Amino acid sequence: MKTVRRAWAELVESLRIAFGALAGARLRTFLTTLGIVIGVSTVIAIVAIIQGLDRSFEEQIQFLGAHTLYVDRHPWIQSDDTWWMYRNRKKITVEELRAVQRESQLALSVAPMVGIRGKVARGDVELESVVIRGTTEEYLNANGGGVQAGRFLVAGDVELARAAVVLGTDVVDRLFPGEPVAAAVGKKVLVAGRPFQVVGVMERQGQMLGMPLDNVAIMPWISFGRIFGGQRNMVLSVAAPPGKIADLESELTPILRKARHVLPGKPDDFSFNRQDQFLKLYKQLTGALYGMAIGVGLITLVVGGIGIMNIMLVSVHERTREIGVRRALGARRSTILLQFLIESAAVAALGGALGTGLGLGVAQLVALLSPLAAAATPSAIVFGIAFSTATGLLFGIWPAWRAANLDPVEALRYE
Amino acid sequence: MSEAPLISVENLTRVYTVGEEEVRALDGVSFDVHRGEWVAVVGQSGSGKSTLMNLIGALDTASAGSYRINGQDVEHLSDDQLADLRNNEIGFVFQTFQLLARSTALANVELPLVYRGIPRKERREKAVKALEAVGLANRMHHRPNELSGGQRQRVAIARALVGNPSLLLADEPTGNLDSATGEEIIRLFGELHRRGHTIMLVTHEPKLAARCPRAIRLSDGKVVADGPGAEVAALGVPSGIPAGAPRAGAAA
């Protein structure tokens, strides 16, 4: 009990001394923390920007369903020198679609997708280069997403190859300026010069990697084929039950090989694409950035730590007599050690707090002035302060050890 | 039956190694100090009185010999135990006051109690009492640079007294004061002596030693005289009373 009380009293006294000493030399304290401030703020700013990017990237790839396999004849992510390997692969056609629909047990839904860029017009307004997509009523089930007005394509639209179209919000905004979204439903527009009736408007999806996703016009794939020709490469969206995406891939591989007449021993001539492949690529990119941030942070923290050590050595030197007095009055070595450790940790924590604030400010500024998003998680803030405090403790050990091991007789006599 | 002495020093020796040479700063010193005594330690500079003071104050440990204070053998104590001993048994008063410049008089006086783990409220009460005892009740919240030299030394004495130590150990307490202020401080020591405090006062001034009931004279690290202050101080040449002679102070 007495030991605890003594330790507590010493701790309180140490904190009092530390903050007294820091307040007594504000300029010096500030300059001492500068290294830490710069280090921590750099790291916090970089991390906040990366986290912001992460978040917006994750939002962006939401349109690729997390549980959806996209079967295409080539992988969507490829390095520069491999594209020729996929160039001569056969198109994916309705045969593969039928095979998957017929044979897959796991697939929750399958939707074909064909696409081209073309004109969509209404009255005098003509939009170039809208993504025109042909699909079936299964599209939403396979890909996710929804309509905000009207309805999506239904089986009847697809079977009868009706001239029905569902528009993305960008298209609606430009064809029906100043009107509510719902006003578009039921209106006629021209797609590649042919009249179509707008049956619905998609929810806004934003953009992915700079490409707008709402500049789209979706129609029955047979209608698409009639306009643009039926011999186009198709992408199959196949939805898997949650957590079964790998199983689905294993199941689809033999089905597709058979449908495409791939001889045994020959490699697959089709590719599965998934959202998490994009995530993986993205994580590789940001991983390098994180590594850099950590490297910069470590270097500056070491520099800042050396600054703190330097100033603490000066402080110990200046306060030699004070240390002697405290020892004479009954302070143990451990008490003196604790006192100086707390002081250096306090300086560093202060620097960490200032640096965190500054870093968040910089990140906000970047977010404001550039298209980069910035988002700081609480963990980054805690981490910044904790890490700088640890730096202060680490680099405070030597000065504090020196203070604790001063000979009281010498220290008292020190002029 | 006479009480056991508060301090018992036997054959105390302290050897410093300077380069290749050994310097015997203290060379076989023996004496006892009983509770309530006021003893001056006199001698010229280099006589070993500072070394003796450091040993008595448990700031340093002896090379040979033994030192007991209040029943504790000091020579085998660990560093932490020495710190605790200083905290509990010794009240230091220094020539240069040695107050913490950034702390108020009250905080300075509280310090020994902090290291003893006394709760804040109790600490404050005791510190206030100690400051009142040295006549500084109205200067408690002043910092040392707002106090005169005499007032600073009073704060230092209050700090030495606050933990109720067995020994008040003063090193040239008037050395940095003008003679009038020094006189006040000596009177204060006299007052403390009358109240029963045990005091050891290290000084090079024979005049000061003459006012103490007992004085020990050191020369070349040895006790050359030990007797009534006035007699020891009067000795121009340190040879009059041999070290083993009956002690006036001890007999009193």
Image: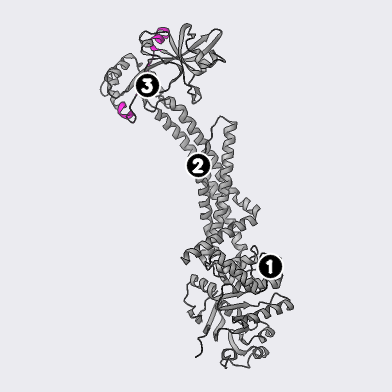
Distance Cα–Cα, label 1 vs label 3 = 84 Å
State the image quarter where residue B34 is shown.
Answer: bottom right
- Whole-percent x and y of residue B37? 59, 85
Residue B128, magenta (yes or no): no
> What's under tag 2, amino acid-wise?
Pro
Above or below, A143 against A196 in this view is below
- Whole-percent x and y of residue A50? 50, 36
> What's under tag 3, amino acid-wise?
Asn
The magenta-colored residue range is A220-249
Which of these two is toward me, A371 or A200?
A200
- Disc 2 crowd rating (10 Å Cα; few below 14, some 14-19, many 20+) is few
Above or below, A369 against A222 in this view is below
Q: Relative to A411, is A68 on the left or the right?
A: left
State the image quarter where residue B200 is shown.
Answer: bottom right
| Residue on which the image places disc 2 | A378
Which of these two is toward me, A87 or A14?
A14
| Residue on which the image places disc 1 | B139
| View extreme (top): residue | A194
Q: Find out whether the residues at labels 3 and 2 contact each other: C-beta distance under 8 Å.
A: no
